[in-house]
Image: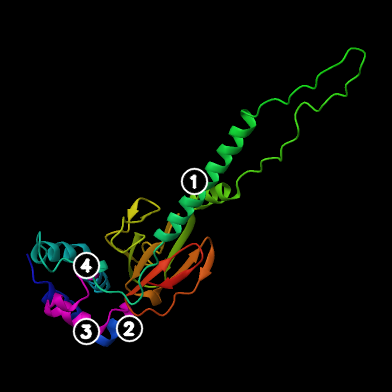
């Protein structure tokens, strides 16, 4: 057991680095750095950010970031502790879009198309044969067409649209670091299932990118991803090999990533 805050402060002072220089190098705000050194963890946005900042700050000072995260978890996080709150519980500036109405409408259109196709099949299968005209000996009766042509049944456009809508094409996201940056990625919402990057890295609990050790994270998904960056100025994003611009969302940044691009969440 050791003191988290005093260990960080002593390491910084040994290196002769000021708080402003730390903020410039790590993109962690000065008030958060001071809170880490004073062990005033309630000042930080939440335990998830606290772990990410601890790891990034300790690694920056040449310390073992995972050791500081483990010490924080053992001393300050307990089952049922009010301090352990999901980031999703805090109000957002922009609510995530709801698709329930569109999905219900799509289901209704699909069911209607199925009913129409079933009725057409029933009419074709059970249509009675045409009545034969009476014949008189010695009289030639012109032959009647055996089956009057029915209008061709075209495949349901709504059913085809539904099939396309349910098949989502995966898209690839590359996060490349030019400096140290903490990264977290979850499917759909910030409390959703963690995204698994190449190499089996689970990004749901946070991960620190280091350009000297692990400069690039790559993952493929089929739906929206909530991407959180501790230092957005230290990374670049590409979607399917196409560079995208990270919108100004503060530091740390919370972004919504889709196949079309990136927006502040």
Q: Split into 4 quadrants, where in the image is the N terminus?
A: bottom left
Q: Is residue 208 left or right of residue 77?
A: right
Asked whether the beta carbons under mark 4 and mark 1 sit within 8 Å of each other, the answer is no
Q: Which residues are magenta?
A: 25-49
Residue sitting at x 87%, y 15%: 136
Judged by depth in the image, the label closer to the viewer, 4 or 1, is 1
Residue wearing tag 2: 24
Residue 109 location (% of width, % of height)? 51, 51
Inter-mark Cα distance, 4 to 3: 16 Å
Front-most of residues 259 and 8: 259
Q: Is residue 124 magenta?
A: no
User: From where the camera sits, is residue 69 visible?
Assistant: yes
Q: Is residue 231 left or right of residue 7?
A: right
Residue wearing tag 4: 51
Which numbered circle lies on residue 16?
none
Inter-mark Cα distance, 4 to 1: 49 Å
Residue wearing tag 1: 111
Residue sitting at x 11%, y 67%: 82
Residue 116 location (% of width, % of height)? 57, 43
Q: Is residue 167 above or below residue 206?
A: above
Q: Is residue 104 left or right of residue 154?
A: left
């Amino acid at each position: 057991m050791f003191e988290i805050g005093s260990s960080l402060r002593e390491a910084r002072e040994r290196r002769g680095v000021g708080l402003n220089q730390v903020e410039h190098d790590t993109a962690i705000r000065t008030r958060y750095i001071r809170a880490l050194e004073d062990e005033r963890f309630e000042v930080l946005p939440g335990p998830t950010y606290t772990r990410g900042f601890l790891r990034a700050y300790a690694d920056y000072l040449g310390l073992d970031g995972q050791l500081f995260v483990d010490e924080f978890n053992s001393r300050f996080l307990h089952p049922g502790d009010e301090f352990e709150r999901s980031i999703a519980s805090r109000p957002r500036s922009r609510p995530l879009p709801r698709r329930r109405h569109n999905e219900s409408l799509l289901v209704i259109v699909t069911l209607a198309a199925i009913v129409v196709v079933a009725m057409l099949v029933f009419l074709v299968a059970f249509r009675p044969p045409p009545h034969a005209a009476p014949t008189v000996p010695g009289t030639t009766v012109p032959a009647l067409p055996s089956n009057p042509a029915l209008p061709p049944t075209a495949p349901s456009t709504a059913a085809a649209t539904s099939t396309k809508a349910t098949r989502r094409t995966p898209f690839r996201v590359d996060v490349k670091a030019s400096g140290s940056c903490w990264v977290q990625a979850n499917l759909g919402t910030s409390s959703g299932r963690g995204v698994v990057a190449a190499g089996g890295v689970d990004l749901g609990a946070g991960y620190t990118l280091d350009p000297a050790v692990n400069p690039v994270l790559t993952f493929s998904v089929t739906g929206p991803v909530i991407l959180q960056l501790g230092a957005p100025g230290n990374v670049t994003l590409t979607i399917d090999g196409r560079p995208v611009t990270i919108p100004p969302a503060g530091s740390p940044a919370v972004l919504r990533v889709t196949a079309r691009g990136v927006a502040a969440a």
